[in-house]
Amino acid sequence: MDTVEHVAFSNFILGTAGLSDSARQQLARAAELPGWVLDAGDTMVSSTYQLRLWELVEHAQSDPHVALRVGKTNTLGNFGIHDYLFSTAPTLADGLARSEQHANMITTNIGFAVSGESEEEANADVRLWNGHGRGRELATQFALAAVVTRARHATGRDVHPVRIRFRQPAPRQYRPFVDMFGTRRVEFGAPTDRITFRATDLALPLRTADPALAAILGRCAEVLPPPPRLEAGWAGQVQQALAVLLGDGRVTIERVARYLATSSRSLQRRLADEGTTWTQELDRARSELVEQRRADSPDVTQTALARRVGYADAGALRRARQRWSGRR
């Protein structure tokens, strides 16, 4: 299954793990996360980026509990409208239900389901559809810690789950999990990753409840288009980079490679693996931009159009268009 999640996850990890600016940039490059994506406000990227980032951050910090620490900072406002769908609900149970209903606004890699176990308890099951190894373990730790932290912040109560269950093997240090979740009943090697809440806690009202705003946000969530998705292939990433860079000075493969947090040699190799070249992708981007500009602004001059797509003059653009026509 090809899963994606909001770039806010990567930004949140890099922004709250206690890293310097240079370290954040280095880790983003090491995870092959295009640097420009971190500046994009509303973009979906492959789930593999977050999994890789967790491993890199853990190594950089020498902290096996970094995911719990980052999860403990998840209060409100980091994940856009999804956060406010939760926070405007009347009770914790309603907030969790809305998080479940609208989870695909921020991720398709996490399955989240709340179900009653008895009159006294209810389970919140969290499942990662994609991922394995240490990256998966850390992402799951973060997810469970973030849910409990949000519950505490929204209710204003020190909510302590009845028990926490992890599929991962038992860690060397157990105490950080007890401190995070406020219960000694933390189990490892379980069949599922799960938080068990008290029914009385789920009935707690949220301090930020707002029925009128909740109704407005609910209607918005039903009609909002999904965030744009970063194309997984390198050719797609090059096209998205060129859409931004064309018209802003001379565009070279070195400049695009820097924009995508890689080297020009690596970019050429990755494009070749996908059966294309830098020249072909640059031509494709220029051709599409020319046609778009001609359709949007029929009166645009050839000279202005040539400069917009990186040619020195109208003659160079005319020859390029003849070449593009010959390829069709």
Image (cartoon, helix red, strand yellow):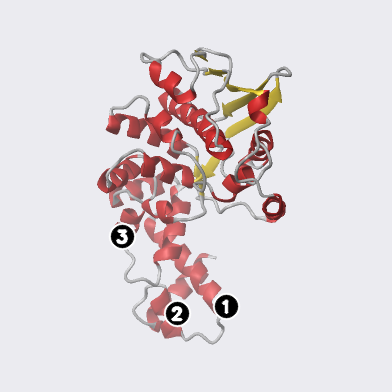
Precedes in sequence: disc 2 or disc 1:
1
> Badge 3: how crowded within 10 Å, few (<14), some, or many (20+)?
some
> What amino acid type should be assigned to the residue bearing mark 2?
Leu
Relative horizontal placement of residue 90, taking residue 62 as reference (left or right):
right
Q: Is residue 223 above or below residue 310?
A: above
> Badge 1: how crowded within 10 Å, few (<14), some, or many (20+)?
few
Are dots 3 and 2 in contact, CB under 8 Å?
no
Residue drawn at (58%, 14%), measured in percent from left and top? Answer: 191
> What amino acid type should be assigned to the residue bearing mark 1?
Asp
State the mark number for residue 255. Answer: 3
Residue drawn at (56%, 44%), measured in percent from left and top? Answer: 106
> What amino acid type should be assigned to the residue bearing mark 3?
Arg
Are dots 3 and 1 in contact, CB under 8 Å?
no
Q: CA distance from mark 3 to mark 1?
A: 28 Å
Foreground residue among 204 and 32? 204
Q: Is residue 254 visible?
A: yes
Foreground residue among 17 and 55? 17
Which residue lies under the disc numbered 1?
296
Q: Is residue 32 visible?
A: no
Q: Position of residue 80 (x, y in %)?
A: 55, 50
Tag 3, which secondary structure? helix
Which residue lies under the disc numbered 2?
305
Precedes in sequence: disc 3 or disc 1:
3
Relative horizontal placement of residue 192, taking residue 244 as reference (left or right):
right
Q: Is residue 296 above or below residue 237?
A: below
